[in-house]
Amino acid sequence: MQPCDKLARRTPDFETFLKVLRREGKPSRLPFYEHVATNTFISAWLGKDISEAKGLDYWRLYTTFWLGIGFDCIPMEIKLNLKFPPAQKADRRPATAVSRQSESGACIFQPDDVERVGWPDVSAPIDFKPFEMVASLIPPGCKIVGGVCTGPFEVATQALFGLEGLCFALVDMPEIVDEVFARLRALYVSAVRQLATMDAIGACRQGDDLGFKTSTFLPPEQLRRLIFPIYAEMAAAAHSFGKPFILHSCGNLAEVYEDLIACGIDAKHSFEDQIMPVAEFKRRYGDRMTPLGGLDVDVICRSDEPALRRYTRKLIEQCFYDGYWAMGTGNSLPPFMPVRNYLIALDEAAEVAG
């Protein structure tokens, strides 16, 4: 499914997005930004299954999608080169563990389990080749917004300790928790530092879901001790090469927004109307951290065209009056979102704000 003509005719101009991230004057048009798009969504737009493509062919289709819908940047991320051991037997899990979601892939239960993880050398934390391939495909004016897929909190709670397991470990073996996060810190900072040296990278980013509807998963004091120092060093690494740093994080982060600003994060992505609408975040924090996205996914999926255009126009009025906002969804482009609805929102933005 192809976009309207005005989106297809957009010439990439990453400088417009940089103005938004740095809050340095209103750009000539409203830029777009998303954290991720599922292969299903991309395939629906392309009219062919992108998952069947490999290597350079995959990244060519991937780049075609973002440029085709009027983006000035290619958002992308690659996972850490961590190799995880097989899931542990049930008798190694805490007796009270009941979760089958966050704990299913956990592999650290005892101090000696740390060495069972395949930790990459700090000089090669991720595979940089995909970024080099995309760099060879993008036209002048376009840049990559790149980072590591899944953040330090997510890796620790989804693949290393498990969320419940991390809570146990904070009490039972705090020194091991500190060691693991020190290793993660070195890997993430190294990845950002190397990405920031690439000319094709216009900004660095990290996705790391810290919360849910009413709260953060860990108490703020634990995030301040374990997670935020990593973010601060990542942001500093990006800034040392003149690149902004973006954080995507879902959940209710009201208790820690001041901490995130203090980390030097330039822009925040992921907003839900039920938690804090993007316009409210902008009112409270927008002069110090740029909001990105915020169109509620449910509204996009369920609205008819007139309602969706009204909703989009209202957000533009609320968030782009000073130029410090990039439009997109509040979360991502999931497989169930109608492509046509998303294109309607982009079309309205192009009509209203260039």
Image (cartoon, rainbow, N blue to C red):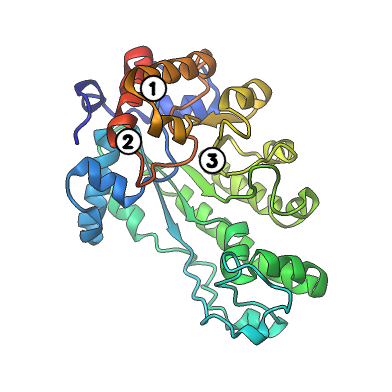
Q: Amino acid at mark 2?
A: Cys
Q: Indicate whether 3 appears above or below 313.
A: below
Residue 99 location, x and y as percent? 63, 67
Q: Mark 1 or mark 2, which is nearer the start of the sequence?
A: 2
Image quadrant where one finds the C terminus? top left
Query: Spatial distance from mark 2 to mark 1, Cα to Cα?
Result: 28 Å
Residue 87 falls left or right of residue 218: left
205, 45: nearer the viewer: 45
Q: Amino acid at mark 3?
A: Ile
Q: Is residue 320 among what the camera can see? A: yes
Query: Callout 2: few (<14), some (14-19), or many (20+) C-alpha neighbours within 10 Å?
Result: many
Residue 126 falls left or right of residue 285: left
Residue 239: quadrant of the picture: top right
Which of the two discs, 2 and 3, sits closer to the camera?
A: 3
Question: Image point 73% across, 36% down: which residue?
Answer: 258
Question: Image point 69% across, 53% down: which residue?
Answer: 217
Query: Callout 3: few (<14), some (14-19), or many (20+) C-alpha neighbours within 10 Å?
Result: many
Question: Image point 39% across, 59% down: which residue?
Answer: 128
Q: Is residue 29 among what the camera can see? A: no
Q: Which residue is mark 2?
A: 142
Query: Spatial distance from mark 1 to mark 3, Cα to Cα?
Result: 27 Å
Q: Mark 3 or mark 1, which is nearer the start of the sequence?
A: 3
Q: Which residue is mark 1?
A: 308
Q: Which residue is mark 3?
A: 246
